[in-house]
Image (spheres, rainbow, N blue to C red):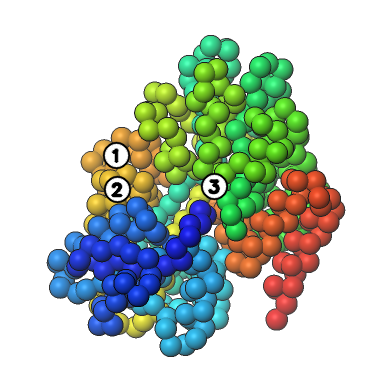
Amino acid sequence: MKRSTASLIVVALAGATLAACDSSSPTPDRDAIDVFGPYRDVEADNFAASLRGFEQETGIEVDYTGSADFVSDLQQRVESGLDAPDIAVVPQRGLITDLVERGLVVALDDSTLTAIDENYGGRADDLTQGAAGYVAPYRVAPKSLVWYRPDVFEQHGWEVPATFDQLVELVDRISAGDASPWCFTMAAGTATGWAATDWVEDVVLHQAGLDAYDQWTAGTLAWDDATIRQALTTVDDLVVEAGRSVGGLRRILQGDVTEASASMFTDPPGCAMYKQASFAQSWFPGDVVVGEDVDFFVMPGPDLAEPSPMLIGADGLVKFSDDERVDELMAYLVSPDGGREWARRGGYLSARTSVDLDTYYTDTDRQFAELLLDGRELRFDASDLMPPEIGSGLLWSEITAWVAGTSSLDSFVTTIDDAVASSDTP
């Protein structure tokens, strides 16, 4: 979701080179497999490191290009009909669905499908739904996580809530004291608003339940429905209302998303909890140890049923070339080797059932990987399921206006419902 100034980077794996895409950048090898994705900076380095094993084993060269404007850049490349990559790593499930429905991607070959079954087992259906046969799972980010400091909870006698109603009660209790319940900020450049959509999605799932969430993401439950309106009202009361988030509305709107948790680590802390995905650990102060200085729980559901459902963000692999070399790389990426080096460095998670969690992941990441494999219900981030122009564009701007108070709830839900209806019109 973060944006940075350089638009593209090219990683030439053989030379382990990383550069902005300009006249001095390495020129991609036209005989190499062309992989395009959203990974940049450290993530691009880690992805490239995981690909080197494939080059060494097969002698096949791979070029990776990462883009800050991935969605629009991929659409332009594919729709030109001349410059589609061989493989794309796509974090928006709605974009994958659109590409499949338009016949723009090539079906996975038998070797890749076999590799998915062998490595993901019962989780394969969860990660390929809506595009089975065309998308291969790669990287997953557990969402629905609430971070907190165990020492602060113990000091105040606060307990981790077991139900959503208990979470609401805890927020009310914390609000009566000196600290704010939440750390929450939204500013993210052109992606401002995504953190607020994550909040709404989590409240729909954990307050209204799985059936309501599934109906909503399937389009049979409108934003204007009473259930979704209730979720939006709950987010307003629970997080946006004065006294709920440290720094108030001004900091919510102007604070960078990567700096939201800072107040949780001050002495005394300015906020008690921080709802964010597993990747939030990379934004914590460098001396913070997960599991000691800070811990997390999955946002609880509407009842005591365990385990609570969890939202995920997921990067899927799709291919645009019917080429045996590309099939070989796809199967490699599905296998444990396709993410092993990145997992060793930290920050890479998958729902593979074929790996030993203790040896494949870092100690911190193993805790997140366990959440993906413990039998709980997983659901894709709702905005990622939408057409990109809505889920990664209009929705962000409209929810920001609603949080800011410059747009009413009625206007917000009507605008999104109208956009969804228009996108469904042939």
Q: Which residue is mark 2?
A: 343
Q: Position of residue 48 (x, y in %)?
A: 28, 61
Query: In screen coordinates, is 230 left or right of 219?
Result: right
Q: Amino acid at mark 1?
A: Thr
Vertical placement of residue 321 versus 339, above or below: below
Residue at left 74%, top 67%? 419
Residue 362 has which mark? 1
Residue at left 54%, top 72%? 72
N-terminal-most mark, 2 or 3: 3
Q: Which residue is mark 3?
A: 311
Q: Amino acid at mark 2?
A: Ala
Q: Residues within 10 Å of mark 1 (few under 14, many from 20)?
A: some
Q: Position of residue 324 (x, y in %)?
A: 26, 80
N-terminal-most mark, 1 or 2: 2
Say which element carries label 1. loop
Q: Position of residue 57 (x, y in %)?
A: 14, 67
Say which element carries label 3. strand
Say which element carries label 2. helix
N-terminal-most mark, 3 or 1: 3
Q: Residues within 10 Å of mark 3 (few under 14, many from 20)?
A: many
Q: Amino acid at mark 3?
A: Leu
Q: Position of residue 172 (x, y in %)?
A: 71, 23
Query: In screen coordinates, is 86 left or right of 274?
Result: left
The CA distance from mark 3 to mark 1 is: 22 Å
Vertical placement of residue 287 versus 321, above or below: above
Is the C terminus in the top left, top right, bottom left or bottom right quadrant? Answer: bottom right
Query: In screen coordinates, is 6 left or right of 361?
Result: right
